[in-house]
Image: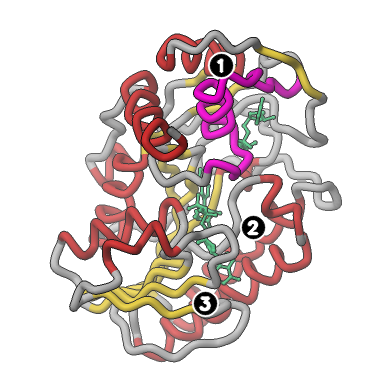
Amino acid sequence: MRVLVTGGAGFLGSHLCDRLIADGQEVVCIDNLFTGQKANIAHLLDHPRFEFVRHDVIDPFKVEVDRIYNLACPASPPHYQYNPIKTIKTSVMGAINCLGLAKRVRGRVLQASTSEVYGNPQVNPQPESYWGNVNPIGKRSCYDEGKRCAETLFFDYYRENKVDIRVVRIFNTYGPRMHEADGRVVSNFIVQALRGEPLTIYGDGSQTRSFCYVDDLIEGFIRFMAQTKIVGPLNLGNPGEFTMRELAEMTLKLTGSRSRIVRRPLPPDDPRQRRPDITLAKKVLKWKPTVELEEGLGRTIEYFRKKIG
Ligand code: NAD
Ligand code: UDP
């Protein structure tokens, strides 16, 4: 199979490329290197089954492939809010271009959607049937609504054009190759702890998130893409739910750091809680996360220790 991965030089995309190459597939990686890095795929560049193309998914692309994973989009709040109009264009135009391509090559196309489509949820945990509680005009809307519109496009192409879609809603995922200046909570806390700087908790730290280790997520992607029973939307994430204060304390314990914890203002529209209901993934994919937060954080800390010294 020839597989296209958009956003393939990013955190999740590069792990996906590794997995596809290990599985014997031919991989074409498209990325504009906005938040991704060539370093993430440097070890693949000379591989005979790997090809990197620097391209922006806002512009159409022609490539003969059997499968498409559409991951191109900045994912951390500081990065997606840096140029919000560009973020929406990436989600919406990127989805249209991937769907048009999938239609032409009659390929299967997976959209990397997000738990952000649930907004600040009034239901916990969140099942796929929950429609969400999203502010359409706030600072996070460029990402949330962009991803919601991409889901709409996927289902319209599915109904109207019989495009073979998969839509996965990813809950906070972490691991090696997160960008050290990415701004997401796991990388922030680890880098701060290793540098002996204060850990910055936004708000009072009682908000919750559920953290999935990257290898578990990629296994879920592969299983979802391979099966033909459901098209989604499908939640993938680790149901373990932690407050940001618990995460900060765990990071301090595992790094052995003596950093202080400080409070910073809570960004607007920051969701109070988030936890996936993964009943569907368990049932259809026979998938569940295998890496506990403490173990995955340990592996991620080792990565950052080597990277930032
Ligand atoms: P990331 O920022 O590391 O990766 C995104 C990649 O897309 C980067 O390599 C970036 O350069 C590329 N990109 C951005 N805009 C582009 C454009 N216009 N054209 C071409 N390439 C472009 O983030 P990630 O965590 O690896 O996220 C990958 C995907 O998964 C994103 O679509 C994100 O919304 C989704 N997702 C991730 C998480 C998570 O916790 N990691 C959670 C929910 C959804
Ligand atoms: N957060 C924090 N300190 C940081 C970065 C983030 O307390 O240095 C909080 C943030 O306010 C949010 C949670 O951690 O409540 C997760 O933030 P992240 O940006 O990782 O992802 P998202 O909000 O998109 O789930």
Q: Quadrant of residue 8?
A: bottom left
* Residue 83 picture location, percent across and down: 76, 61
The residue at which mark 1 appears reads as 248
At which x and y percent is residue 271? 70, 31
Residue at image position (48%, 60%) is 37
Left or right: where 224 falls relative to 128:
left
* Residue type marked 1: Ala
Q: Residue at x 55, y 48 (%)?
A: 114
- Residue 218 in sight here: yes
**Label 3, label 2: how far apart the Cα atoms are:** 14 Å
Q: Which residue is mark 2?
A: 148
Q: Is mark 1 within 8 Å of ligand 2?
A: yes
Q: Whereabouts is ligand 2, in terms of quadrant?
A: top right
- The reply to whether the magenta stretch includes residue 29 is no
* Label 1 – label 3 distance at C-alpha: 43 Å
| Cβ atoms under marks 3 and 2 closer than 8 Å | no
Magenta segment, which residues?
Answer: 180-203
Q: Is residue 289 above or below residue 39?
A: above
State whether residue 181 is above or below residue 84. Answer: above
Which residue position is annotated with label 3? 157
N-terminal of the two: label 3 or label 2? 2
SS class, disc 3: helix
